[in-house]
Image: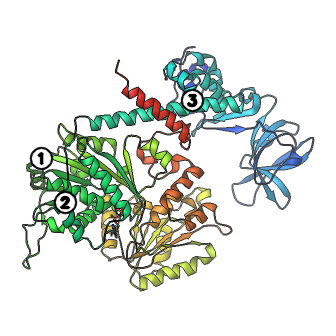
Amino acid sequence: MTLDTPISKIHKLRKSQREALERLGLRTVRDALLFVPYRYDSFDRITPVNKLRVGEKQAFRVRIASIETRRTRRRGLSLTEAVVEDASGPVRAVWFNQPYLPDMLPPGTEVLLYGKVDYKKSGPQLSSPKFEKLEDDADAKVDGHITPVYSASAGISTRTILAIVRKCLPLVRDIEDTLPEELLERQDLVPLSDALQELHLPTTREALAVARERMAFEELYELQLTALTKRERWRAGGGENITLSPEHEAAFRDALPFSLTGAQERVWSDIQTDLASGTPMYRLLQGDVGAGKTLIAGLALLATAQQGAQAVLMAPTDLLAKQHFVTLKKYLAPFLGEVSIGLFTRTRQSIHNGSQKTLSGDTQDYDCSKAVFLEALADGSVDIIVGTHALIQGVVQFDHLVLAVIDEQHRFGVEQREVLRRAGGTRSPHLLSMTATPIPRTLALAVYADLDVSVLDELPPGRTPIATRIVSPRGAKVAEQFMRQQIDKGRQVFVVCPLIQDSDDESLAQVPSAEETFERLANGLFSDVRLALLHGKLTQEEKDAVMSAFVAGELDAVVSTTVVEVGVDVPNATVMAIYGAERFGLAQLHQLRGRVGRGEHASSCLAFVTRSGRPAERLNVFQSSTDGFELAQKDLEQRGPGELAGVAQSGLPDLRMASLMDTALLARVQEEARSHLLAPMH
Ligand code: ADP
Ligand code: MG
């Protein structure tokens, strides 16, 4: 056996199992050894039954006293009930839909059980505990009883993976280390082979923690290196100096009906410094929905255009691009003779250069063909371009691109950034990425290691706060009547559901789908309301049509999935009704809430919960805080980085090991990565 031996040679596999392993990327012994468990069941701290604590996860070492499976009244479900006991006494344990358990764990079997203790009418009970037989299941048995759990997939169980990995372990010494020895020494990290040995066959909690730290370090280190390399590539070659003339800046500010917030001033000053530094800007602007990012973009775009260079603002959808086009024409109204603005989406190309006039003398846009637009782009007769992905598909030739602003940057891929970089010619353009997805500081260090970060942490004054209410099933009727009243007053309503269609999945049976909710409202309380259904299965054209109609006030309400998340501005919308709210993460709830409260009317967010009783703690947090960063931090703590909106799409690999909340570890990683990149190449 070598590291390259196929797994099928060392462990008998059914075809379905082999296919499942392939799906997990596991073909060889090496693959199996590098397949790190994603969590552990700890059977190592055994609680005597008479010391159990209700509501907590605990491990028990018990003997099965009696066990039997019966069907429940609900079709297709079976319930296995057992009485288990140790020297201190008995306790009940139950499992659902595992009818084979009495055969597997006959009375007399010694087992380790691990799981949460619930309190039922009949007393305390272990609900669906994990189990591990003590006598015969030698493969799964572990000293110290910390059992690795692998992310199994359909067709292969974590137990089988465990058995395979254990067979491969004798070769773990042959795995080459990925980190240089000096680094391991400097950072006091264990070699990879030691770490893997411990991860697959844990001895103690302490040793396991050491192994995981090593893996976390490595994961973050690679991430940092990639990020820093990207950054260096972007910044290589020097950037054009851009300075907004004091006259232009004064004219811009004078035309605004308000003054900049302190945060906007601070961020603008960061950006001015970058633009004039001789090195291409490479900056992320984070700001909660409504914080006023577009205005900042407007200043930077003006600075560039006023100097005779080109600037592009990329938006993720046609609708947002149109919205930006309109907004920028407003912000830049004093300069529209001097500076021209173009819009390039899949369906519309338009240029506003101050020369096209209506009969009444106002300047207006002129729509043109793609070819004409691209010509204007190439000869420099359009200065500021608002575009979608459509703009940078295929060959696109700018005359002199010096600034690229990307809105909702997580919706753009690395390749698209790369296209923009090359469009700058020999020099990279200045890059300003904007996002409304608040990412906690610690996480930002890892996710955006390559970018300088500015934060707009202050909303413009005078916003009426959005009232957030949790709506129980009992209160649903009244809440929907409230929505109806708002519509009668001429306001508009967003309705968001977690699913598109009803699901066959039992666990989702209670969750309201967009289709079902749409039908119910359309046939009931909202029967005479202009109502539309919007979800991700529609084509982009269909989605745009619905959203445009909503923006234009031709619809009173739209029922949708989370496709409404991105920054569409509908000042007349005053209610965000979220059904099945317990199914959303905090950051996402917050994003949704930010769709309303953008106009003069008082707005509310109604979080409908599916089940009665005490709402999830998460929703209470949501109700009590309007701070996106705080909510994102809580989300990170509760659900881990993978679930955090914006992180999943950020290109961040699946960080299974890395404790992203570990700021100290991140700092060490950064230091190593920086010094590695600064070291002379060899
Ligand atoms: P974001 O893109 O950050 O979500 P926008 O740029 O769309 O936010 O701004 C939201 C609204 O706030 C817009 O109507 C904008 O005109 C307004 N706004 C921006 N800056 C200010 C400010 N300093 N004072 C008052 N209103 C502002
Ligand atoms: Mg925006």
Q: Secondary structure at mark 2?
A: helix
- For the residues labelled 2 and 3, the Cα–Cα distance comes to 53 Å
**Disc 1 residue type (three-letter):** Asp
Q: Position of residue 4 (x, y in %)?
A: 51, 17
Residue topped by disc 1: 399
Q: Position of residue 141 (x, y in %)?
A: 74, 29
Q: Residue at x 19, y 60 (%)?
A: 246
Q: Position of residue 190 (x, y in %)?
A: 59, 24
Question: Looking at the image, can residue 524 be seen?
Answer: no
Q: Residue at x 55, y 31 (%)?
A: 215
Q: Does 309 appear above or below 26? A: below
Foreground pick, 326 / 297: 297
Residue topped by disc 2: 246
**Disc 3 residue type (three-letter):** Arg
Q: Residue furthest front?
A: 246
Q: Is residue 139 left or right of residue 495?
A: right
User: Foreground mark, 2 or 1?
Assistant: 2
Q: Secondary structure at mark 3?
A: helix
Q: Quadrant of ligand 2?
A: bottom left
Q: Is residue 375 left or right of residue 526?
A: left
Question: Looking at the image, can residue 206 be seen?
Answer: yes
Task: Give the mark, 2 or 1, whose residue is nearer the N terminus.
Answer: 2
Q: Residue at x 22, y 56 (%)?
A: 301
Residue topped by disc 3: 214
- For the residues labelled 2 and 1, the Cα–Cα distance comes to 26 Å
User: Foreground mark, 2 or 3?
Assistant: 2
Do labels 1 and 3 touch, CB within 8 Å?
no
Q: Residue at x 56, y 59 (%)?
A: 583
